[in-house]
């Protein structure tokens, strides 16, 4: 392998949705250099951060019926039974939910946690409180999916965060998707909730780091009860 090929493999692709923002930051940096050099260097740092934010690295997704993989990069900020958003029509009773919080330093390209069919997409406007809070699932702007699988229906909800102002959806109702496929993007800090069918138990603990399309959140075919965790 040549040195050029080695370098190329280390360069993470940028999602096309981020190019206009990176270009804007770059132009602003040139203007700031003209005003005052230190401001220009600050603009360069912000431009590099913007490029890092919109990175879209390839992921290696485990493929097996019953596996639920993480839809987002970040950490598990909430675990428990909660009632899904009413606009989804998924259930009137509490369901097992796993919430992944994405900081402004995490990759924000969201991926489907399972293989199946997009049965419903429901968008609801709302406020923009900190996505790390439980009430964000009820109050914040959100875009939800119901995915029909051979093991039941899975709910996935993109939630805008404190400084997020745009939720992008890349799929349509009725579309067939495979686990790990890109389904959307949330700009600048946000959260994704996953609602699991009855009987599903999380295979991750509170505070665990998750990688979109790779980390297994639950296994519907092999329930694992009584699992505990430690921080170390």
Image (cartoon, rainbow, N blue to C red):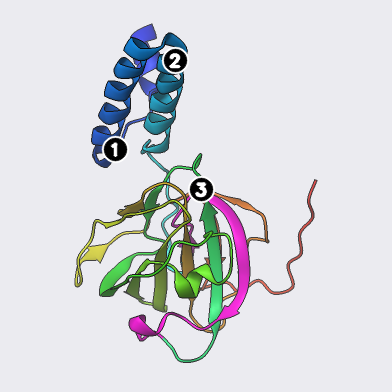
Q: Is residue 17 above or below residue 177?
A: above
Say few, some or many: other residues with alpha carbon within 10 Å of mark 3 (under 14 / 14 to 19 / 20 or more).
Answer: some
Q: Quadrant of residue 53?
A: top left
Q: Position of residue 162 (x, y in %)?
A: 48, 55
* Extreme residue toward the bottom, this view: 92
Of circles 3 and 2, which is in front? 2
Q: Secondary structure at mark 3?
A: loop
- Identify the magenta region: 68-90
Q: Secondary structure at mark 2?
A: helix
Residue for badge 1: 18
- Mark 3 / mark 2, whichever is N-terminal: 2
Q: Along the line of sight, which residue is nearer the eye, 231 or 40?
A: 40
- Mark 1 / mark 2, whichever is N-terminal: 1
Q: Name the residue at 53% across, 82% down.
A: 95
Q: Quadrant of residue 58?
A: top left
Q: Are marks 1 and 2 in contact (CB under 8 Å)?
A: no
Q: Position of residue 196 (x, y in %)?
A: 49, 75
Q: Determine the CA span between mark 3 and mark 2.
A: 32 Å
Mark drawn on residue 41: 2
Residue for badge 3: 211
For the C terminus, the quadrant is: top right
Of circles 1 and 2, which is in front? 2
Q: Position of residue 157 (x, y in %)?
A: 40, 68
Q: How many numbered circles are shown?
A: 3
Q: Name the residue at 43% across, 88% down.
A: 91
Q: Name the residue at 42% across, 63% down.
A: 159
For the N terminus, the quadrant is: top left
Say few, some or many: other residues with alpha carbon within 10 Å of mark 1 (under 14 / 14 to 19 / 20 or more).
Answer: some
Q: Is residue 10 visible?
A: no
């Amino acid at each position: 392998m040549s040195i050029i090929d080695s370098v190329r493999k280390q360069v993470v692709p940028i999602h096309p949705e981020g190019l206009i923002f990176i270009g804007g930051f770059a132009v602003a940096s040139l203007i700031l250099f003209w005003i005052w050099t230190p401001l220009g260097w600050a603009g360069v740092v912000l431009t590099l951060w913007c490029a890092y934010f919109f990175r879209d690295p390839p992921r290696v997704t485990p493929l097996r019926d019953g596996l639920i993989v993480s839809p987002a990069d970040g950490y598990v900020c909430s675990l428990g039974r909660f009632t899904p958003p009413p606009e989804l029509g998924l259930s009137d009773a509490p369901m097992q939910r796993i919430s992944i919080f994405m900081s402004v330093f995490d990759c924000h390209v969201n991926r489907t946690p399972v293989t199946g069919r997009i049965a419903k997409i429901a968008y609801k406007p709302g406020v923009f409180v900190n996505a790390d809070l439980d009430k964000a699932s009820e109050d914040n702007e959100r875009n939800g999916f119901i995915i029909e699988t051979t093991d039941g229906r899975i709910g996935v909800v993109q939630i805008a965060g404190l400084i997020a102002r745009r939720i992008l959806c890349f799929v349509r109702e009725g579309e067939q998707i495979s686990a790990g496929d890109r389904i959307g993007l949330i700009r600048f800090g946000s959260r994704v909730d996953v609602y699991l069918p009855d009987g599903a138990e999380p295979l991750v603990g509170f505070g665990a780091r998750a990688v979109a399309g790779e980390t297994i959140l639950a296994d519907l075919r092999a329930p694992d009860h009584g699992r505990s965790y430690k921080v170390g």
